[in-house]
Image: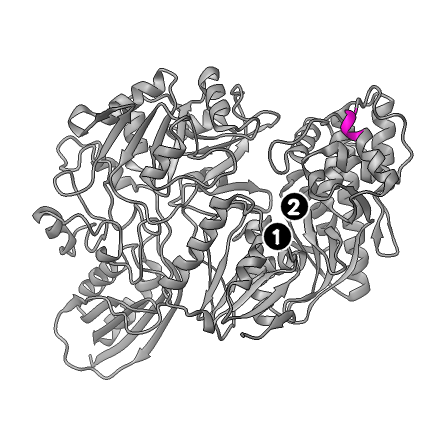
Amino acid sequence: MATSACTVTVRGVVQGVGFRPFVYRLARANTLAGWVLNGNEGVEIRVEGAGDRVDAFLRELRTDAPASAGITDIAVAVAEPSGLEGFVIRASRSDDQPRVPISPDLALCARCLAELFAPADRRFRYPYINCTDCGPRYSIVTRVPYDRESTTMTAWTMDPPCEREYHDPASRRFHAQPNACPSCGPGVMLIEGDRVVGASAEPIARAAALLRNGRILAVKGLGGYHLACDARNPAAVGALRDRKYRKEKPFALMVRDLPAARALVRLTPEAEALLASPAAPIVLAPARETLDRVAPDSDELGVMLPYTPVHYLLFAAGAPEVLVMTSGNRSSEPIAYRDEDARARLADVADAFLVGERPIARRVEDSVVRQTSRGPVILRRSRGYAPSVVARLPASRPVLALGADLKSAITLVVDGQAFGSQHLGDLEHFDCWRALEESIRDLLEMYEIRPAELLVVRDAHPQYRSTAVAASFHESETAVVQHHRAHVASVLAERGAWGERVVGLALDGTGYGDDGSIWGGELFVGSIREGFERVAHLRPAALVGGDAAARHPVQAAAGFLDQVETPDLTAAPFDFPSEYTRSRRLLETRTRIFSTTSAGRLFDAAAALLGFTRPVTFEGQAAMWLEWLARAAPEGEPYPCPMHGGEIDWRPLLRATVEDRARGRDPGETARAFHAGLACGLADASVALCRAHGLETVVASGGVVQNGLLLDRLVASLEAIGIEVLINHVVPPNDGGISLGQAALGALGPCTSSPSR
């Protein structure tokens, strides 16, 4: 058969996941000559050989790729044979702007896990075991292309056995950049006060004993430090809450294995698959067991499996079966990831530190996912997912979208690929602001983007901290995208639906509106390319004290109930505290009163009416409490929530809530009727707009869409009459996903912009 030849470029997550060794073995199996290397756009391949063997190679290139690879495109170009002999892996090439996605960090694979506990293996109980199928990636990369010298492993030189594996095509560690073993790689130590326990004294065994004895341990992981304690020891959990200043927000849990997870929470097959995936996120699932002080006022627990060798070794050494495994920080601060910083910031929280020697290049927190009736929804996108490509935009220039101030995350578009950063935190905290600046610098340096090339996109809020960051890009063109339009656009951008016209439903707490008021319950019609016209919204209410109302549900209630006749809410059964009376006085004098259409504050008002009258201790707490209350009640008749003249009127909804609470109806039943009423009102409004504009698709996004009870009822109502509902799956529906929508609208749609100066 005649000799054929071709060049192949494979794009996607194909560096750092064993793709070159896979290509090498595949070419050798098909007796082809040529080479493979890491290039700026992906993996570049040249093959020559019999035509049928080349065809087989190209088929198997996609069908048999490593599980952790994410191929987005394979470009094949016919070439003239040049008489190549043998097949080799060439050195990486970096002669142009890098465009290759960096692989996210991956959980320990089954084969490395087996070796970890095999006494005859030379990596027996080695806490940094990894291969091309698993281990650190983004958290150790300092630049691209992804090679050993471009990682924090550059300080360790492989010994001869590791070097042989690295160069052996038959080895699973062929070109595994973090490859190491006990004789040549980093180790771990336990620091307990002034005492340092080294490898010879079994630091992991001592750490497990501390956990069994109710102590709090700081554990260095892939992307930062965790704080761990025995989840079934209320005293330990309580001490962690007190020291971390985390009053009520649920703690994440790590369980020994999948059977332990099944005993703790109710898992669907899809949720189990998420737990056991290479991303290994925290998965929210209904609780089977009540753990004191772990997740107050919630019927869910956030559970993850071990994903590093250290985690497995801790459990094997006798650590409790269920551990609290929460971010290593004080409440709301970014996670500590540098050793000295962790020792300083967590000195009064942790009783001891389990420290690995390998440096972390950047902080990467655990991801959080919920499996829903609509598929998986990412609530926090970070380890295991970031910084992979979240969408592909037909954009001809680099775009940097800065997101929002809460749940900050950025998106960088390079050569049409939208790279979504890890979760960065809330920018009201200085360390989170610094984390934002570090992430911007990281991504621009990795992909060699100059500010003069950039389109920088920001939120419309003039006082956002991210707005100030945008202003610092003096050489860049800037664009402004309204908050809720970005929410809607993020869903369509995930799907590559640039021109699809939809009804867009954006439901959240707060966002700066076109008129300068505080929006949060908005309905739009349009597309990414033409823009989104605001065509309906929740009826405006008074917001007492501005942002402070988000922390005090009774303050939010005062503004909404100013339009509803009520009894004395300071008396039983409502028992509103004095904060409500003060808010009423502000309303009377019109002092610090703002206008809002916020769905989030509407939920806060309903929660206050049903008993949540204390200040919240974390974002969304009152609404989560209201949903928890409602889930325990049977389905009933929804309260009315009609639309008049483009306004969804929540007054009958709250009036019914007040009346039923006053007559002693079960609070859970009332909460259920509230959820159903608002869902029906939103569905009716969406149907009316679809019919008026000849549309058949509704997009729903925003933090309130995370409410499963509301979303399920909304989707059921719309799908029953043939209207398709689209939600986020690749980026969070909350503000953590907003930068993708900003990037899409900034690059492709109409928005306010200013040229570079």
Residue 382 seen anywhere in this rendered image of the structure: yes
Residue at the image position 53 percent from the left and 46 percent from the top: 378
Looking at the image, which residue is at 24% across and 31% down? Answer: 189
Q: Is mark 2 on a helix, strand or loop?
A: helix
Within 10 Å of disc 2 (Cα), the crowding (few <14, some 14-19, many 20+) is many
In front: 507, or 596?
596
Looking at the picture, which amino acid does disc 2 mark? Answer: Val
Residue at image x 54%, y 40%?
Answer: 370
The correct choice, above or below, for 424 with respect to 188 in the image is below
Q: Does the magenta stretch include residue 307?
A: no
Residue 727's label in the rendered image is 1
Q: Earlier in the sequence, mark 1 or mark 2?
A: 2
Q: How crowded is mark 1: few (under 14 residues within 10 Å), some or many (20 or more)?
A: many
**Quadrant housing residue 1:** bottom left
Q: Position of residue 293 (x, y in %)?
A: 53, 21
Name the residue nearer the viewer: 99 or 692: 99
The percent coordinates of residue 206 (x first, y second) are: 26, 21
Badge 2 is on which residue? 705
* Image quadrant in which you'd find residue 698: bottom right
Type of amino acid at the residue the image marks with label 1: Ile
From the viewer's perspective, is 512 left or right of 17? right
Task: State the residue in front, 212 or 270.
Answer: 212
Asked if the residues shown at circle 1 and circle 2 are in contact, with their CB atoms under 8 angstroms apart, the answer is yes
CA gap between label 1 and label 2 equals 8 Å
Please determine whether, in this image, residue 715 is positioned above or below residue 293: below
Residue 17, percent from left and from top: 30, 54
In magenta, the rendered stretch is 576-580
Q: Which of marks 1 and 2 is in front?
A: 2
